[in-house]
Amino acid sequence: MSEEIKLMKGNEAIAHAAVRYGCDGYFGYPITPQSEIMETLMVLAPWKTTGMVVLQAESEVAAINMVYGGAGCGKTVMTSSSSPGVSLKQEGISYIAGAELPALIVNIMRGGPGLGTIQPSQADYFQTVKGGGHGDYRVITLAPASVQEMADFVALGFDLAFKYNNPAMILADGIVGQMMEKVILPPFQPRKTDAEIKERSPWASVGKPADRKRNVITSLELDPAEMEKNNIRFQKKYKEIEENEVRYEAINCEDADYLIIAFGSSARICQKTLETAAKEGVKVGLLRPITLWPFPSKAIKEYAKKVKGILVMELNAGQMIEDVKLAVECSLPVKHYGRLGGIVPDPDEVWVAMKDELGIATDPSSSIKANAGESISKEMISEVITNLNQMVP
Amino acid sequence: MKHEIIIAGFGGQGVLSMGKILAYSGLMEGKEVSWMPSYGPEQRGGTANVTVILNDERISSPVLNEYDIVVVLNQPSMDKFESKVKKGGVLIYDSYGIHQPTKRTDIKVFKVDAMDAATEMQNSKAFNMIVLGGLLKVVPLVKLENVIEGLKKSLPERHHKLIPMNETAIKKGMDIVVEK
């Protein structure tokens, strides 16, 4: 039987997908804009059907340490939060990475820093892909851009986490979390049995039989020589992930003159910017990193060879742009456009900014404006005219 | 066919649920749909709005700068969104909450006195469905039978007894909407 198409929020899709994946436990603490994840799990009440535990912890710190404990026992466990809550979880994430445990963490980002706002933001890019907690570790980071991907990336995140014994994160924002779209939920699969867990995770702390040594789950190693060995092992694993697990989507990139690079909700907004650019006769492609770590540096480097300039659009002050610049090694102009603190730009605003930043000349009488009611500044028009003049031989 | 719609009003007027019913109705017709709410503290008393997109093709941005159809149910929403109706687009308002109608002449403007009609029906909860009726008369986005199907999908079973009342309200809206 084919699965029914449903209409739901991204947050709700995550909850449904977790139960269907055979998740053993969810531990969380409510925070806008992701509270629907635990709310939906409470309504689904999977402890009555699959046996999955859903627990509201006393804090985010407690929740991530419950995940640490569950993961240490080889269980399929997850937590979710939004920016300020994910900051609180960073110590736990570092420990989970250090103990090489699989776990899924969901961050539905909101405007920061501090408690900030509850509106959408992508300002936790650095925190997620550059560490966040202490030590040389990496978190496999998936950036969904639709409700369907919110559902699909639960399975993908868990699969990757278990493949590499490493924490994985779904990094989305208030737009993808709160919007409703069509979704086909993944099929149900049963939770792993104790025997299956022992086979999948022989390192798990599941009770010591007489014929083997104790399994110890820890990130502590007092001997620095041993700790260096551990770190070398981690780095080898990270390299393997970088080689094998890069994912991205390229839209109209093949014959583009300019490129937009954006992830998650920003990529959705920029898809419409492509339409606007096409109306003005400019070929713009969109490259959407799906994995933020590992970052699609090679793909970006290849596509960059064919274009005159790149705009990186993010709901932050310029974070992913650093990775894009590293990828293209300053071979062409890479500019940034973003709105901050929970403000979301509209597709035309991005196009106007892109023309301005990259000096793309179009018909100055264009009716496309940054914001309805606000006209383009005289400086911007004069710059366009200057560019037009430069094009005349 | 693509329709980009925003519905805006006070929190509590049923703006988000009206958008939800529209989205479910679109789902019933096999369309691509997107429903993007303002989810800030405005839901609790200030202005709330929801963007609904119905399309035959994959939907790109859920965030828009202009709309084919704008439904405004209070003055702040009129002030904020009247400039964002596409040229030749449709603006629908309820005159109960709006004392300064639009000055634009390049769009089609319709009035649906839903608050008065809801009061007459002695059912304030019918308000947003009357507005929806007005909208569907002006732009037949979805068939009435699919709205009823959408209601069945979006409402919990225990509220299904309210569906006939909602149908009456939608038909009322269809009757009373007038072009300005």
Image (cartoon, coloured by chain):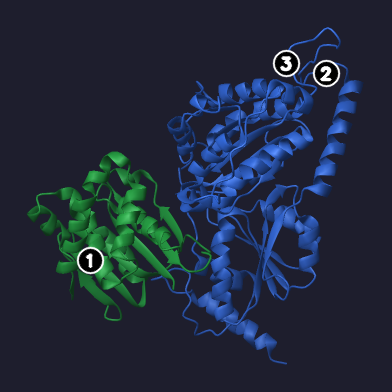
- In space, the residues marked 1 and 3 are separated at their CA atoms by 63 Å
| Callout 1 secondary element | helix
Find residue A384 and report its horizontal and vertical position in percent.
59, 80
Q: Are marks 1 and 3 in contact (CB under 8 Å)?
A: no
Amino acid type at image mark 2: Glu
Residue with the mark numbered 3: A206
Residue behind mark 2: A221
Decide: few, some or many residues near mark 3? Use Cα within 10 Å; few <14, some 14-19, many ≥20: some
Q: Position of residue A302 (x, y in %)?
A: 80, 65
Q: Residue at x 41, y 63 (%)?
A: B29
> Within 10 Å of the Cα at label 1, are there few (<14), some (14-19), or many (20+) other Cα atoms?
many
Colour assignment, chain B: green
Are the residues flagged by discs 2 and 1 from a single subunit?
no
Secondary structure under tag 3 reads loop
Which chain does the residue under circle 1 lie in?
B
**Disc 1: which residue:** B134
Up-down: is A230 above or below B49? above
Q: Quadrant of the C terminus of chain A?
A: bottom right
Please identify, in this view, whether the residue under mark 3 or under mark 2 is nearer the observer: 3
Question: Is residue A51 or residue A368 the one in the foreground?
Answer: A51
Q: How far is disc 2 from disc 1 in space, using C-alphas?
A: 70 Å
| A323 left or right, relative to B33 | right
Left or right: residue A112 versus residue B46 is right
Query: Residue A200, relative to residue A7: is it above or below?
Result: above
Q: Residue furthest top?
A: A210
Q: What chain is tagged by disc 2?
A: A
Foreground mark, 1 or 3, reads: 3
Three-letter amino acid code of the residue under disc 3: Val
Left or right of residue A230, residue A310 in this image: left
Q: Nearer the viewer, residue A36 or A124?
A: A36
Image quarter of residue A357: bottom right
